[in-house]
Image (cartoon, grey):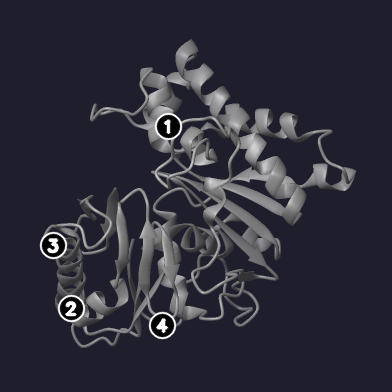
Amino acid sequence: MPLEGTCPCGDRRWWRQRAPQGSPDYPPGHRSFINKLGQCVRHLVENDYQGRPFEFLGVSVPGLVDTQTGELVRAPNLAWSNVPVREWFQEITKLPVLVDNDANAAALAELWCGEIAREGVQNLLYVLVVEGLGSALIVGGKIYRGSRIGTGGFGHLCISPNGRKCTCGGRGCLEVFVSNPAIIASYLGKVSPTRQRLSVSAIINLARRGQKRAREVLVATAEKLAIGLRSLVHGLAPQVVVVGGELAEAWFLIGPIITEHLKGTFIVPELATVRMMPAMVRSRPSLVGAVTMGIFPEMTAPYERFPVFGPRTRAPSKASAAS
């Protein structure tokens, strides 16, 4: 599972590291990984911004997060459980740390910097297709959390009871069919992808050039995603559904398929008018969203507190971010 941080580590490039996987309880390597990322953030703060105060460090992670304690409760795709992310980062960086789920952070990035930022959208369902399938629900301009560990488990909505086993332990979850590993595995014709250097973006580029296999895989992925979205739109009735991650690059192909599959399937016809769109923030949306966590701690849309700020205007406080 690749995680990213903004530390230049001497060469001013984005720092990228693959997080270790292991047993659920404190798997080997994950403390050292957080130590390494934390040291890079500290290097950035102390060397590139000497004497400039930072108000907080925003961290976005893939999995269920206890936002009161900053603990990563469970991340199935990392095989991490009960990891005190906030505590460890605070020990290393000496900064206040805010931790949230990567899909929540990506949804905040869309509210701040995406096309909908100018439209006053208050009710949004964001679906993030990455190593897994995450989701965020924004109601009244705020992240809806439900319990203290939040929502976001829509990727584990069962759409095929006898389907393949998911990392969560269930079978036939939406994530089994709609995620980066699932798309690559389907293209390769294997149950799980190998370590071949193949990305979803590469498959999408092949589809653009008309390759039949690539187009078939993306069409099948869109059809499965539409099944899940139909249930979610029925139950939640958002103004807008945003699909993020590399898969959004294939909107030229999957957008019409999803829209067509949703037509005529709703009990209330008005639900068929829910707007479906690809994410506008394509580059590291969870990292962008991590910066907003402390700027708007109540998780409101950007214009409510500071109407003079545009979607891409720098916020009035300094923050570092890790994703």
Give the mark nearest the N terminus, 1 or 4.
1
Q: Residue 95 at x, y = what percent?
A: 27, 84
Mark 1–mark 4 Cα distance, whole angstroms, equals: 40 Å
Residue 279 makes an appearance in the image: no
Q: Which residue is mark 3?
A: 9
Mark 4–mark 2 Cα distance, whole angstroms, equals: 21 Å
Q: Which residue is mark 1?
A: 182
Mark 4–mark 3 Cα distance, whole angstroms, equals: 23 Å
Q: Residue at x 74, y 29 (%)?
A: 260
Type of amino acid at the residue the image marks with label 1: Ala
The numbered disc on residue 210 is none
Type of amino acid at the residue the image marks with label 4: Ser
The crowd level at tag 2 (other Cα within 10 Å; few <14, some 14-19, many 20+) is: some
Task: Say which element carries label 3.
Answer: loop
Q: Are marks 1 and 4 in contact (CB under 8 Å)?
A: no
The crowd level at tag 4 (other Cα within 10 Å; few <14, some 14-19, many 20+) is: few
Residue 175 makes an appearance in the image: yes
The numbered disc on residue 317 is 4
The numbered disc on residue 92 is 2
Task: Say which element carries label 2.
Answer: helix
